[in-house]
Image (cartoon, grey):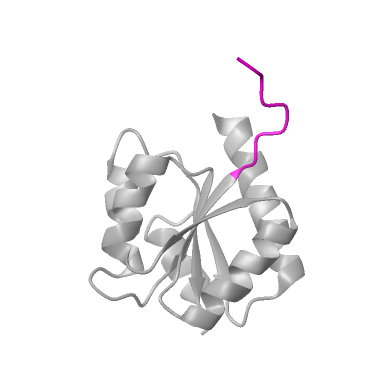
Amino acid sequence: MAEKVDKKLKILVVEDDFMNMILVKEILSLHGYEVLEAGNGKEAVEKASKEKPDLILMDINLPEMDGVTATKKIKAEESTKKIPIYALTASVMKGDAEKFLGEGFDGYLAKPIETKKLIESIESGLGKEKAEG
């Protein structure tokens, strides 16, 4: 069996807005990541369990199941609890970052998405994950 030298890191993007999904997918693909998609929280929980991504970018306001609930479900499962999950949200009021970190998220990214911040946060999250795991 041929050994895969350069395994692409998988990032699950949970986003119900089509244009935001395209933007994030484009940015991540250009930086060499494999992108998995979920359009709601329920789908995110299923994909996280099945695919075991290296990191998850989770929108908060989602249909079927919101991002906070989905994150709690993912973090409650033994097989997925160590996956870093970043809140990806337009909620940018003072105290929102702390609120989401308190809900179990590992990081926080504000919309509109800034490419440089997105990539830096992902690299930092993946690095942190490797150090812990």
Q: Compared to 6, does 50 lie above or below? A: below
Q: Residue furthest left?
A: 64
- Position of residue 19 measured from the top left corner of the image (x, y, whole percent): 54, 82
**Residue sitting at x 23%, y 71%:** 64
> Is 44 displayed left or right of 83 in the figure?
left
**Quadrant holding the C terminus:** top right
Q: Residue furthest top?
A: 1
Q: Main secondary structure of the magenta part?
A: loop
Residue at image coords 39%, 72%:
60
Report the span colored magenta.
1-9
Q: Nearer the viewer, residue 128 or 13?
A: 13
Residue at the front extreme of this rendering:
1
> Where residue 112 sits in the image (x, y, percent)?
61, 82
Front-most of residues 127 and 30: 30
Residue 130 position in % (x across, y down): 61, 33
Q: Is residue 78 above or below residue 124?
A: above
How many numbered circles are shown?
Answer: 0
Which part of the image, by quadrant, shows the N terminus? top right
Q: Is residue 55 left or right of residue 103?
A: right
Question: In the image, is residue 5 part of the stretch drawn in magenta?
Answer: yes
Depicted 77 relative to depicted 91: above or below:
above
The image quadrant that residue 126 belongs to is top right
The spot of residue 49 in percent (x, y) is: 33, 42
User: Of 92 and 102, which appears nearest the observer?
Assistant: 92
Question: Looking at the image, which residue is at 31% across and 53% down?
Answer: 45
